[in-house]
Amino acid sequence: MRIGSVFGIVNVLLGAAVALAMTALSAAAFDTNARAAWVYDVATGTVLLEKNADQPIPPASMSKLMTVYMLFEALHEGRITKDTQFPVSSKAKAMQGSTMFLDERDRPTVEELIKGIIVLSGNDACVVVAEGLAGTEEAFAREATARAKALGLTETHLTNASGWPDPQHRMSTHDLGVLAQHLITDFPELYKNFAIKEYAFDNRAPANRHNRNPILGLGIGADGLKTGHTEEAGYGLVGSAVQDGRRVIFVLSGLGSEKARAEESERIVNWAFRQFTMAVDTHIFRVSNRTGIAPGKNVLEVERKLIRFVPKEYLLDAHHWLILHGRYVCKARKPQCGSCRIEDLCEYKHKTSDD
């Protein structure tokens, strides 16, 4: 169907709903308290929210996602296995902040290090991985920065593997979101590690066994990814959630407290799923296929096309109007084509009269 016809149908159906749509748009606007943010609907490839999204910021531990990506890639390429053991250097042992409490006598496996980074946010684990993969942390940072550029992360420059404060260590919220999508799509089996809620490595620090991701376990479909916090960066989170087959990825940075991060993360997930919802019932499915506005073999395919073609500000009203049009005009057994306001734009081959 021609794009012009699609917009013609939308405009006719929604002409009487413009005022309502503008009211809905105003109500739907989201004003985040984060200093920088990026929210993305994966199914439609739509950026739902951007706030200072391309500004390089201190990513804190959220940049550990790049270290995890490099580790996942080495596993995927067969350069290492989950049972591969890495030595622990004095530099790794000396790392402060969040740690696995490793010492030089340890030989942690790759599987243990994955959990140690994702669940425990171990700075020492990051150094062990960096040295194990590249010889030195400095060499690893250069390799990780180059790999980030190849992945399309344009505002990323890494100087270490852990996100330890450094004025040259920077990523944007947009970059972090793109990286999250790569982790999800490039390594779907390994990505499941991000949903682990606790990990007590050798029972060395039982109080530090819990995943800091505040949205895991809230019942909103969250399954990853990584928190971050330093005095300069504030509190941040790269998160993702799935509801009814639809995935949303979001990045928040610069919040004032753990509580603010938890509340804002839950709020933004709930908002994101409300924004892009076009539940396709039998009426919408029929109208979309008959008119050619969004033909599809199943409801998900139709939904994705509708979301792609219908202007964002009209989505809520489009849903109601398409249902009403299918219920009272474009009926299943005897469509009333003669009184249909979009008959001239409709591509249905078996049009009827109203007699």
Image (cartoon, helix red, strand yellow):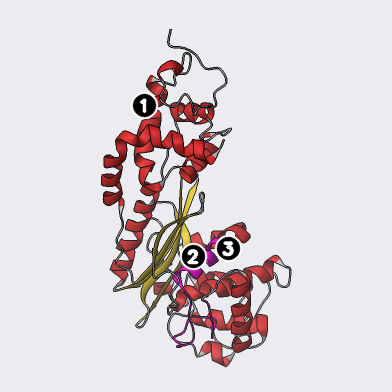
Residue 106 in sight from this viewpoint:
no
Q: Nearer the viewer, residue 154 or 230?
A: 154
In the image: residue 292, left or right of residue 77: left
Residue 236 in sight from this viewpoint:
yes
Rendered location of residue 137, percent (x, y): 59, 87
Q: Which residue is mark 1?
A: 324
SS label for mark 2: helix
Q: Nearer the viewer, residue 329 or 47?
A: 329
The three-letter code of the residue at mark 3 reads: His
Q: Which residue is mark 2?
A: 177
Residue drawn 37% across and 20% down?
328
> Can you tell which quarter of the image residue 13 is in?
top left
Q: CA distance from mark 1 to mark 2?
A: 38 Å
Residue drawn 37% across and 63% down?
214
Residue drawn 49% across and 29% down?
345
Rendered location of residue 22, percent (x, y): 28, 46
| Crowd band around label 3 with a 10 angstrom C-alpha radius: few (<14), some (14–19), many (20+) | some
Q: Nearer the viewer, residue 218 or 317?
A: 317
The three-letter code of the residue at mark 1 reads: Leu
Please say if 152 is above or below 341. below
Rendered location of residue 87, percent (x, y): 64, 84
Q: Which residue is mark 3?
A: 182
| Crowd band around label 2 with a 10 angstrom C-alpha radius: few (<14), some (14–19), many (20+) | many
The three-letter code of the residue at mark 2 reads: Gly
Rendered location of residue 77, percent (x, y): 72, 67
Which region is colored magenta? 156-181
